[in-house]
Structures are given as C-alpha cells and as structure tokens.
Image (tube, grey):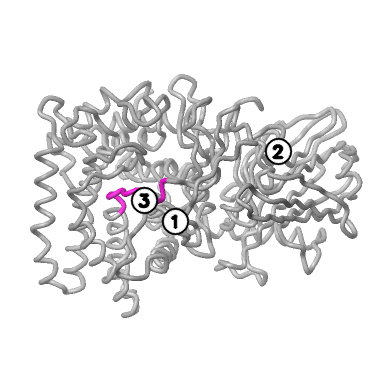
Amino acid sequence: MDLSSDYHHGIIGNGRTCAIIDADSSIVFSCMPDFDSGTIFAKMLDEDKGGHFTISMQSGKVVSQEYEKNTGILRTVFKGKSGSFELIDFMPRYSWDGRSGTKKEVSADIVRVLKPLSGNPEIIVDYNPQLEYARFNTKSFKFGRNRIKTTTGGTCPSGKTIYESCYLYSSIASDKILKKEAFKLTEQKFLLLSYHDKVISPDEERVELMLQRTRSYWLLWSARTHRCDQYSEEILRSAITLKMLQFSPTGAVVAAATTSLPETIGEERNWDYRFCWIRDGSMTVDVLNRIGHPSMAGSFIHWVMETVPTKDDALQIMYGIRGEKTLTEEALGHLEGYQGSSPVRIGNAAYHQQQHDIYGILMDLIYKELIQHDLGDRHPAPETLDQLWTRVRSIVKTVGEFWKDPDRGIWEIRGEAKHFVFSKVLCWVAVDRAIKIGNMLKKYDWAKQHEALRDEIHNDICTKGWSKKKKAFTQVYGSEDLDSANLLMADYGFIDPMDKRFISTVEQSEKELCRGGLMYRYKNQDDFGEPSSAFTVCSFWMVKALARCGKRAQAQRRFRQLLKFANPKGLYGEDLDFKTKRHLGNFPQAYSHLALIDCALELAEDCKDYLIEE
C-alpha cells in the first residue's frame, strides 16, 4: 500500500463535524464542535504546527484500509513482527436513546477502537492536538482517571479573546499516551475524543454500544438508498459522503469538509469551503432526494426559509451553517499551507458576491420538492406553502430586476463582473419553474403574467450568448471563450439535448476544454491567471451532456475512466491534476460526489444497451 500518495484519505463524520484520516491512520484534519469551528488537528495545513492523532505499530505497518460495507466506519489493519490489529474509526451517529432521527443531539466525538487480531502487537498512540488553528500554545495534561484535557487560549490581533478545550477518554493509561510510550495490545482498547467533558464517562461497554448503534444507523440508511445495479457501490459511497456533509442541526450542507487545500500546489487558489453555498446545497439534496432521502431536501429548504425569512431579505450565494450572513475572510499567516501552498484562509469573502445562478437552482429544488409532495399525496401545511410561495415570488421579483446586470458567475470570479451565459440561463430557470409552481398552486394569472419575462430572457441568451464563429454558447456575452457550466443547459430544460446548438456546444467544449479525459472549468485568464487543474465536477458534466445528446457509448467510456480516478476510498477532491490524476482542492467535495451519482443514474437507465467492448 502506497502511503505517500496524496489524498489517500478517508472521512468519518456524523452530521455535526468530521475527521479526515490519512492512509497511515493519522487524523490530519478535524474541527470541533462543528464543521466550521477551529481545528483540533490540521496537519494537512501544516506538517509541524497543525496537530495530528496517529496510531502506529512498532515493527509493523498498515496493510489495508477500507470502509465497512455500506457504512461510514473506516477500518485500518496493521501487521508486523509482533502480530496484527485493526483500528476502527467512527463518529457516533444516533441519539442518546437510540432513535435514528437524530439532529441536534449528535455529539462532537471521534471514537477509535483498537482490536487485536493476532499475537501481541506493540502500539504507540501519538496524540498531538493543536486547538484553534494552532494560533496559541496548546497544553495536554492528565485530568482525572484515564482522561486527558487539552486547552489553548490567547488574544487575536483583532482583540478577540479565545479559549478552547477538548477531552480524550481512553482505556489506555493516560501516561502512556502523553509520553508516547509503546504498549502491548492484548485486549480491545478505545480512545474517545470529545469536545465536551462527559457527564457519563465512556467505558468499553458504552463504546461498543456506540459502535453497534452507529453501524446499524448506516446500514439502515444505506438500505433506504435507491441504487442501480451497475454502479451500486459508487452511488452508495458518494451518498454516504454527502450525508456526512449535511449539518444535522440546521439542514445546511457544507461544500467540502476542509479549508485551504489548493487547486494547484504552490498557488493561492485556496478557499474555505466549510460553508453552505445555495447552489451546492440545493444540488446535493436534489440528488439525494432522487435516491430515496427526501427528508434531506426538506430540512435544507426549511433552513433556507429560516435563513432568509422576509420579503426584503436578499438571497446571498452562501451562508454559515447556522445561517450566518457575514463570513469575514482571514489569512492565517502562521500556517504554511498544504505542501507550502499559502495562504491558509478561514472565512470566505465571496459571500457578498452577486451570482445570479443561485435563484434558478434554488427554485428548481423548490419545484421538485412540491412535485414530490403532490405526487406522494403529502401536501405541505398551508403555512409552509404560504412561505414557499412568498419566497418564489420574491426570487422572481429579484430576477426581474437584476437578470440584465452582470454578475460574478458560478466560478466566483473576483475581478470585473460580466454577463455570464450560465447565470442568465439559471435566471430563465428561476422564472420557468416559478411559472410551473404558480400553475401547480392555481395562481394562473400570476403565472401568465410572467411568461413574457421568461421568453425575454430565453431570447436574449440565444441572441447574445451564441457565437456563430465558435458554433457554441460562450462563457459571457460577446466572448469566444467557452465554459463547462454550459454543459448543464439541456439538463435544466433551457434547450433540447438533441438541439444542434447544444450538440455543437458539447462538441466544441470537448475540443477546447477537455484534456486527457478531464475538463477545465474554462481556459481564459481570471484573477489568478490561467487555471491549471481539472475541476472534477466538470468532467462529470461532460459525461452527462454526452449521454443526453445521444453519445451514450462515449459517455459510458468517459464515466468508467473517471471512476478509476477515485482515491482508494472511493472519494474525490475538488480538482484533479491533468497529468498525474492526483486529487487537489478541498476534500471530499460535495459537488464531485453529487455529479457522480447524477451520471450513474443517467447511464444506468439503459446501460446494458451501451456496454463498451474492452
């Protein structure tokens, strides 16, 4: 097993926070108590200062690491001269009384179970937390029987005073952990890291119950997941990953579990993705809704309604996972960044950008949610319908006022605002779905009144967004540059997938933006120069576009190639290096996994008719 390869990580999580675990068993990134809290371990962002939590074996090594089937539980096996053992990593996912519908009751706990398999393996626990992004000195010390307390504190340059702590409970002697002393593993042991000082201290029996309940939770959740036969494992692994990324207390979905992992090594395209983008969240719960998890879509829409409660409350592109509207960006200069790629950022200055595509993506989700309620004879309560209808009308009012204005586009260009074609397309989607919703709710006059706006936007895009010279829809009005986002035009119903203009756009995008089976988002210069890595979701978009316009054999071939680029745990980062195919960017990326599921569902519909000869 190659432990030096990058992004061979797994993720464990429970809907409150998560932990990224390297192939050598090290926890190299985790925040507590929530996704967007300060880090406890951040070795991914600084090898020396970031902190880690490693289990190792003297005269032994990791020989395998994989998820337990159909779960979010990670199992690592060590073998050496003195024997072998397995390490079981998980975050408890259930409520205190065992009910599966847990939300706010999920604890910020990481559990590591060490189970001997043969002989008497000698183990070393290297517990090195560095709290709050390692801003200040962190101290760990014995705190009662078999319990270690870790604390940090200090004053930031802004004047803000910080204090944080966490607690490690274990059936291993605290002295051996603090001194990093080797010990023989003769019986099962546990380590439980919690943000909280437990009222009821965990013991072997309680930890085993946590493991069994968590295992049952994931198995039951997986059993409810609709899957096709051909891509069953890939769909389920991606679905479990997306489930981990939804913040249970509110329904918000983080774009990725990490911050500041670079799109290209040594460059400064490093962003904090531990927030909820309206676009990413809507698309994530939409695909999970399609595979049997409608409650996730319902909780997300409820979060949106709670976050943007009034008619004059403008919809932002992104929010904090509790609905925070100000996400001030800060660079942490004391951390060197992933493999020296600085700056390390927390917060995200893009929150104030205007991106007009979000209106259409959210409206499309609301429309699909209402269809599901209608078809399933589960009509929402009148008050809920009133709130949704108010939000629908507010969004259309906003679109009517601003669709002609330039914006920053789906890729969050930080330079000059432009007339992005995809943004205009999603403005059309917003009005189109709103008209459909109006007709569903018998608001026929309102729906009829807005047909002219829908048609005006459509005609404007077809006139100004189409290049006769390039024979394709372009990135912005008046440009010859292409954009992978336009591969979604048929998927949203703006254009028929067999329309010659869409087919030509797909063909030209493949010609100009594809390299070795992977796709650029775009190739023209932006604020940071020309992009130099493939954006993973765009490669999946090309697969879907090829399938939709009749090139299904080619789509199958591309999809099977993309599946081979997954890391050993079946996970994807935000980007892929064109040459080496190594993963880059924040990890795991919700966008990548929702697009994988979307492609699998598209191709599995008639996959037997389009099998590729090897």
In the rendering, at what x and y percent does residue 521 appear? 34, 32
Where in the figure is residue 150, as x and y percent of width and height? 79, 52
Q: Which of 371 and 19 is in front in this view?
A: 19
Q: Which circle's residue, 3 or 2, is located before the other in the chain?
A: 2
Q: What element carries label 1?
A: strand
Name the residue: 56% across, 49% down.
70
Q: How far apart are marks 3 and 2 (CA)?
A: 33 Å
Numbered label tally: 3
Mark 2 or mark 1: whose residue is earlier in sequence: 2
Tell me the CA gap for discs 2 and 1.
31 Å
User: Which residues fall within the magenta stretch?
Assistant: 350-358
Give amino acid for label 2.
Ser
Residue 332 quadrant: top right
Residue 279 - label? 3
Q: Is residue 183 above or below residue 35?
A: above
Pick the residue in front: 186 or 350.
350
- CB-based contact (under 8 Å), mark 3 and mark 2: no
Q: Position of 300 compared to 603: left or right?
A: right
Q: What residue type is labelled 1?
A: Tyr
Q: In which quarter of the image is residue 278?
A: bottom left
Q: Which mark is residue 26?
A: 2
Image-quadrant location for residue 106: bottom right
Q: Is mark 3 on a helix, strand or loop?
A: helix
**Residue type at mark 3?**
Arg
Q: Distance between the residues labelled 3 and 1?
A: 11 Å
The answer to whether marks 3 and 1 mark residues whose Cβ atoms lie closer than 8 Å is no
Percent from the top left, x then y, of residue 234?
A: 47, 42
